[in-house]
Image: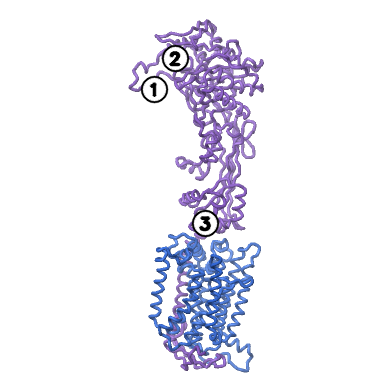
Chain colours: A blue, B purple
Amino acid sequence: MATIAGPQPIARQRGGSRLRSAAAQLDWPLLLAVVAILVFSVYIVDLATAEDIPGDPDFFVARRLLHIGIGAVAFLALYALNPDRVARWAWVLLGALLGALTVVFLIGTVNRGSTRWIEVGPLNVQPSEAGKLILVFVLAAVIAERAHLIGTVSLSVLALIITAVPALIIFLEPDLGTAMVYFAILAGILLVAGAPWHHFAVAGVVAALAVLIVVVVLPNTGVSVLQPYQVDRLTAFVDSERDPSDSSYQLEQSKTAIGSGGALGKGPEGATQTINDFLPEHHNDFIFAVVSEMFGFVGGGGLILLFGIVVWRAMRIASNAASRFDQLIVAGIVSMLVFQVFVNIGMTVGIMPITGIPLPFMSSGGSHTIASMAAVGVLMRIHARGRREP
Amino acid sequence: MRLWPRGKRRGGLWAGPGPSSSTGQTVSSRRASPAATGHSGAPALSPAIAVRIATLAGIAVGLLAILVLRLWFLQVIGTEAFASQAEVNRLRTVQNEGPRGEIIDRDGEVLVGSRLVQNLVARPLELSGARRDRVIERLSEKLDIPAGEMRAKLAQGDALSYRPVVLKEDVGPDEQLYVSERRRQFPGVTLQPAFKREYPGGSLAAHMLGYTGAITEETKDIFTRRGYLPDEKVGVAGIELQYEGWLRGVPGEQTLEVDSAGVPVDRGLLRDVPPKPGNTVQLTIDSDLQRALEDALRERVEISGTATGAAGVAVDPRNGEILALASYPTFEPKAFVEGQDKKIRSYGLAANNRPLLNRTLTGEYPPGSTFKAITATAAVEEEVLNPEEAIFAGAEFEAFGSSYPNFQDRIDGFVNLRQALEISSDTYFYPLGNELWKTPNRSPLKDWSEAFGLGSPTRIDLPGEGRGLVPDRNWKRLAFAGDEYDEIDRSWRPGDDINFSVGQGYLQTTPLQMAIAFSAIANQSGRVLTPAIGKRVLDPGDRQLAALAEGRPVRELDVDPQTLHQVRDGLYRVANESRGTAATIFRGFPAGKKVAGKTGTAENPQGEDHAWFIAYAPFDDPTITVAVVVEHGGSGARSAAPGVCTVIAKHLDESRDICGEPPAFEQD
């Protein structure tokens, strides 16, 4: 790409209108990419769920719009909020998160089932989603404050503990997928913070051993850490012929939907896998399969490209960030988004386990949409106060 | 609290992420103003950190690239297989049974019908893994179907993959409602309409109607070639088998678009070949007469005390149409519809004495004295007998050192043919057998037996008919070919024809054969008819498609009408004259409805004598011939004749009270 030179098109002038000034501070490609994905999500949810609730074809779309509306408020709020001030409350936020997670866990225990929500009036608030963003702030703050300790085992372990405690509660809810997102955030932040490579190596080995013990060794000794459905889901993608459980059924239907979409898709009318309900969770975890069935490689690849634009702009913001703290926040958010995108789409195309991680900005579900949009608000804020490039 | 370092470092060169940033970019020295950021910290992009950011960017882009690559493989390279899988998912071919035709009697009364039922079926392909377990659990809990049974059926169905498996037949209305309201809870499970054979008359005419059953492993190929589906029910006995081609309903086929629960979607029906209902087969049977005959047989067996079964045929001697045909013990064809061991017992299948056996066609019995009508015809026609001449019939007949006793060593005195038939004198007929034996190079009794239709199937339109046995020289030679027999055993001796003459010895006949033989005597012109039980075929709109009973072969006996007249006279006397063996029973019939017949008490090696009575009426212009045999029932006059009488009374619209008491003493 040719070097872009010359003066900045929009001069930042104190005397200019505030609106123009605010507009100038926005990263427009990022914003447009996110808005495009959100609009696409509304369109797809509308197409995919028109028949789901008899007599109320707009049920899911209305909810989707409501969530995006709340998400827009969260975006503006986080954009307005000075991250530094959030950072000051980091430990308090972490404490509040742990408290909320504990409440959810206890409710789940009482109900004898998987619970991830606290009901607040008509809304179900999912603390683990807000927790992703809180974790980003806490880790960034803690590490940035201890920049002189970066590279020491003690700081890495501190960061690990901060991550692992809420992740463990979430894992016990049980919500394995979200717990994994927390570790992805940790990994991204430590990576950009400059933690030594051998820390990652050790963590990787430990993680592999843990998976081995949890999935293979403990069940064989009679202790089951994972719920049976979790083991099913995690192993379904390995060999769907061997394990014809419901998870592999979902996976087969998802692959069939995507594969049958072909290059250009079957169109909203012809997407029988979606319309006729073969595709499970088609407005939710498997929404990418809907996109790919209806609009083919062009649609699915285009969506991934939009996520690519988000990554590109976010990395650009990181490199121009005003501080290590800002940088680490961006790193955490990028890790969070990319990990979710990869695991969710990877799940629908059969290269990742089925973990119930939503596709950012696309899947139905309020909490993660609001959290993701709030995260974009944070990115925008960091962009606004970052270094300017020609 | 200071949570971050206030580093003063300036940003250096940075290799940014993404394909567009591989080349170096000049980073401006401009940076965020302290006012905007809220702090005065300098940007912190050391080369080491830049590498880290680039690494994160690289990982992110790499992961997205993997997804695009995978997508390419699925959607561009592998799309065909998935597209066809999506079609398999979407399209469902449903076969709809065509109702099997009804079987009705000559007056239109329904003997076998079809009832629409709903079967609970599952498609094994759509019901796999955890889904199957869940559905089975729910079904067994809510609908009380044994889980193990369902599992086994589905496991069997897996091999056939596309064919639905019937989990439960004839689901009740409450259960239908339960399942159809919760279709999403039972993916892969649907209700499928089917038709079930219904028998309004219970066991009425069971043997003749037969039953339907599944296509077996042995017959699979034949039916598949004829376009049957593997799970169709086909006729396996009786009329159901005989007229399978007319009765069968041809299944239709629908191609539907369905959703994941197997529920057709709105635009669902893509192709529809409607099923064709089967045709109605009308029988020559008169249900009322059939009922009377069955009641009579049961009554005769119950009264006799020794009988192991009974069979009866009523045929129209003018055209061979079967009016009633019954075998006892009987069963309920419903047993084969229900098909459960427990129930079979209550439908009579477990009774002694082979209830499924249709004794009218397959039961072979020596005809005993009823055969004398044929011996008489043969003797007159072969000119060894002058029917008018009175011959002395003593207590026994001696020939070649053997003695053949009269029935109960009775001395009958001088009797002519009419009288000999009336009193069923054995010693009158023995010499005739002896004389006929002397015929060179021929066996007249055999020839006349065959002329009357014995020894070969009557070719009634029912499957499985027996041929009986008319013995002759050649037969005896083969039958006694074993080493344990000598040449004398193998030769045809006078005794063989002497026994033959009174319907004993090796002769075996079915009740139907005897009814046809007597019809030839009854119908004045000596016509040996081919009996017919199917009358015609009607399409579902009641238009006639085929006349089954017409044009059946008829053979006329080469006999002097006068001879048959003599025989008929004798048979009339049996039922009407003072010494007639069955006169006490039939005497009461008014003029114009007089009955003629012949008793038979057939000795047999198995036990008690078989009781026979064969009669026709009205004597002057017969419209019915009835033959009844009561297996091991003893005396023909006492055990069989009363049954015949009630059937004829019914046919002639007389009360059964017209039938008198059987003779007080043993009669042949």
Give neighbour class at mark 1: few <14, some 14-19, many 20+ (Cα, 10 Å): few
* B242 up-or-down from A346: above or below: above
Q: Earlier in the sequence, mark 1 or mark 2?
A: 1
Name the front one of labels 3 and 1: 3
Residue B236 position, x and y percent, is 51, 37
Mark 3 touches mark 1? (CB < 8 Å):
no
The answer to whether A288 appears left or right of B648 in the picture is left
Q: Which mark is residue A102?
A: none
Question: Which residue position holds label 1?
Answer: B479
- Residue sitting nearer the eye, A82 or B242: A82
The amino acid beneath tag 3 is Arg
Q: Which mark is residue B497?
A: 2
Q: Label 3 to label 2, Cα distance in Å? A: 76 Å
Q: Earlier in the sequence, mark 3 or mark 2?
A: 3
SS at mark 3 in the image: helix
The answer to whether B645 appears left or right of A224 in the picture is right
- Residue sitting nearer the eye, B141 or A377: B141
The amino acid beneath tag 2 is Asp
